[in-house]
Image: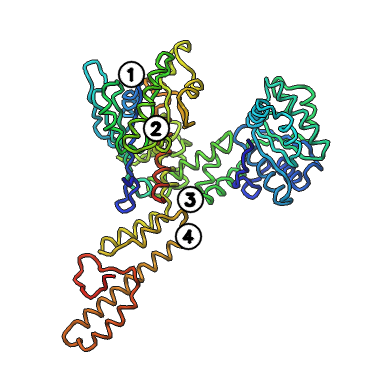
Amino acid sequence: MTSALNPKYSFDTFVVGAANRLAVTAGHTVAESPGAAYNPLFIYSGSGLGKTHLLMAVGHAAKKAAPKLNIEYLTLDEYVEAFHASVAAGQGDAFRRRFQNVDVLLVDDVQFLTNRKEMQSELLRLTEALQAAGRQIVLTSDRPPPDIADLDERLISRLSGGLVVDMGAPDYETRVAILRRKAEERGARFEPGVLETVAQAEVANVRELMGALNRLVAFQAVNDTSINAETVKQILGLAAGEGETAPPGDGRAAAAKSGSGDEFGEFLADVAVTVGKAVEAWRARVGEAVLRWEGEGYRTHRLEALLQRDAPGAVDQAITAFAEDVERLKALEAEVAELRSPRSRKTWSASRRSRRKWPSWIRRPRGRACSVIPSG
Amino acid sequence: MSLVNFTTREITCKIVYYGPGRSGKTTNLHYIYGRVPDSRRGRMVSLATQTDRTLFFDFLPIDLGQISGFSTRFQLYTVPGQVYYNATRRLVLQGADGVVFVGDSQARQLDENLESLQNLQSNLLEHGVDIRTIPLVLQYNKQDLPRELILSPADLDDALNFRSVPSFSADALHGKGVFETLKGISELVLKKLAAGTAA
């Protein structure tokens, strides 16, 4: 019932700033020496500030440092679900043994312990057992242990006994760094000053920041124009004249607006992002090549086969190679035409030899009077 | 039918709103129609009886314009919910890329919801489509009605959502959940289309 660690959530992709530096340092320490310091490590912050990312980063780093470690990540709900399933199957003891053998246990969203006395007892027992065995436990919540309603005093004491550390909202510099990192990951390019302008917006968490970035990416995608630091204010509603964003007659500009009650615009922005992900640029390049060569009368099965791939590996070389082969074919056609002229009939046998060397994929271009091109 | 056509650079999605009679399928389309700019929508074709029941089907084409270099169009259809129009329902379902099942949240309509869902499954099968593979989302409409008359989304999930597909609470009359549902099915359809081109 445990979840896999998301490979994207590592320390490498975590942007560190003043508001989360302590939590990240503690996470590094725990990953390097599980069970030796800060046990349990309790990280809390508001929603969307990177708790889950940091928790998984600890798991990745611990696994990298000691590949044989048994590391489990799960949300509290998954833990509860697994517990209930085990008890229902009469395997309660097996459940406890399983978790007591974990070297690094990462539990997300423990604020949901409220009103779950049975699970509180279970978690208390587990925390004690793990600590006694020198095994590490890291927990996250949206509030510190004493603020979790209806939490057993003993559990509050136990969870607070290691290190309780919070993460705040990112400051301006961190927001700029996050935006740059995410834009780079998505292959999006913006004019100088755009991301800095976005970072000036008051956002409560990183998710809102990502929402703003998504809108900019969608705007650029649907309008095929780059945006500058001035227009970004209008797009994100940072300036008074936010309604002036849309060029006259262009409904697509609405795609980048949000929070204005423009449901269709928001829908369009979402679709643009999904299409952008679905129709990768490399497929579009292959599509263009197919369109071009098919239009000139050549068979393009070899190119179309590229579209069946899951990954873009070397498609550009394949497109270039196809173009080069077409040029060779054109040269051969010209040569054959020359050979077919009465003056050149004597050299016909030589041309027969040369055509045997033609690539097997080459077929007679449609609509071309070139009868000497081999059929098989 | 290849809906992401790299040669003509077109994306076309046919989405069918399915469900029992009076569950709010046409209301969904009317709400969407009212929010789409004039330049982006085609004429909504609606064939209704004098009592506003859908007689044949509703059709709403939406032109999303150029997205990532692809001319993108959505075609939204509803089916008549009444039992005796099954031939029409089957016809409308033909070639659907995704289905929104609009359920009526009223407790007394649960059997109608189940019957309609089974009808959807059987009509899809007639077209050789397995309901487990086609993009599908559920919408639990009329959640604005008094609590004592309706089932909660969780109860409806238990009763209807055997595939664990995305489900949305809605009050289509006032628009709550309408675009969320459309976004949900669009995402599933577009992902499937992209996967289809790679298959």
Q: Which mark is residue B182?
A: 2
Give the label, 2 or 3, closer to the camera.
2
Q: Residues within 10 Å of mark 1 (few under 14, many from 20)?
A: some
Tell me which amino acid carries mark 2.
Leu
* Residue at left offset 43%, top offset 34%: B184
Q: Nearer the viewer, mark 1 or mark 2?
A: 1
Looking at the rendered image, the quarter that the C terminus of chain A falls into is bottom left
Residue B141, image x and y in percent? 41, 21
Seen in the picture, residue B6 relative to B45 is either above or below; the reply is: below
Please rate how many residues cluster around mark 3, counting C-alpha atoms within 10 Å: few if below 14, some from 14 to 19, many from 20.
Answer: some
Q: Which residue is mark 3?
A: A188
Q: CA distance from mark 2 to mark 3?
A: 27 Å
Q: Secondary structure at mark 3?
A: loop
Amino acid type for the residue under numbered disc 4: Gly
Image coords of residue B94 (percent x, y): 29, 36
Q: Earlier in the sequence, mark 1 or mark 2?
A: 1
Mark 1 → mark 2, Cα distance in angstroms: 19 Å
**Label 4 – label 3 distance at C-alpha:** 20 Å
CA gap between label 1 and label 3 equals: 46 Å
Specify the label residue B22 is tagged with. Answer: 1
For the residues marked 4 and 1, what is the alpha-carbon distance in whole angstroms? 51 Å
Residue at mark 4 to residue at mark 2: CA–CA distance: 34 Å
Amino acid on which the number 3 mark rests in the picture: Ala
From the viewer's perspective, tell me whether residue B193 is left or right of residue A46. left
